[in-house]
Amino acid sequence: MKAAIYPGSFDPVTYGHIDIIRRASEMFDVLHVAVLDNKAKTPLFSVDERVKMLKDVTCDMPNIVVESFSGLLVDYAKKNDIHVSVRGLRAVTDFEYELQIAQMNRLLSKGSLDTIFLTTSLEYAYLSSSGVREIASFGGDFSMCVPPEVEEMVKKKYESVRKAD
Ligand code: PNS
């Protein structure tokens, strides 16, 4: 069985991520979408919220496993016997960072974890989670970036942030 892992922060998941998930899921028997639980950062959404969001938006795809992970990606991959990591490339500006992660993971895994890159579909090339957060924080329209259920969750999150201020 050919499995791959698509790791990320997904804070929040965008149409760009979903496009990569759909395309990668057609190339592998199982695609693990691994949501980073980074204790050193304060994300907008908790890791449980991000996992739920991803499960919701991939519910029509039968071969997706959504899980959180903390620590090194290579450890998650080894535990699940996965040898391919998938990442999306939007533009050449992504490449340097992605190349570094890919090479680091290959080194850390002693050659066991390779990375393949899918180029983001052109209509999503401008999308980023940080862009969504910024637009949402100023009350702008980001409906072109995320599915309606995610849009709702992001709006609610910023409403509660504003109330708490
Ligand atoms: O969506 P992101 O934030 O660009 O994803 C980055 C991610 C999760 C792929 C990367 O930060 C990661 O794999 N972190 C886990 C820690 C790790 O394995 N680091 C070594 C590779 S640099």
Image: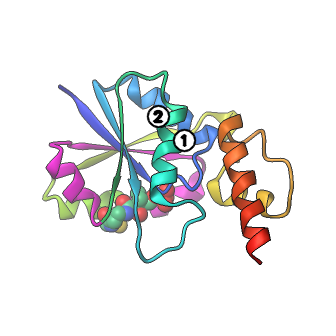
> Label 1: which residue?
17
Q: Is 59 rendered above or below residue 100?
A: above
Q: Is residue 81 magenta?
A: yes
- Near-viewer residue (150 or 90): 150
**Residue located 75% across and 52% down the image:** 155
- Near-viewer residue (114 or 7): 7
What element does badge 1 sit on? helix
What element does badge 2 sit on? helix
Give the quarter of the figure containing the N terminus. Answer: top left
Whether label 1 lies within 8 Å of ligand 1 gets the answer no
Mark 1–mark 2 CB contact (< 8 Å):
yes
Q: CA distance from mark 1 to mark 2?
A: 6 Å
**Residue located 44% across and 23% down the image:** 61
Q: Position of residue 21 (x, y in %)?
A: 47, 34
> Label 2: which residue?
21
Q: Position of residue 26 (x, y in %)?
A: 40, 22
From where the camera sits, is residue 14 visible? yes
Q: Position of residue 142 (x, y in %)?
A: 79, 47
Residue 112's label in the rendered image is none
**Residue located 63% across and 38% down the image:** 15
Q: What residue range appears in magenta? A: 71-100
Q: Position of residue 118 (x, y in %)?
A: 47, 38
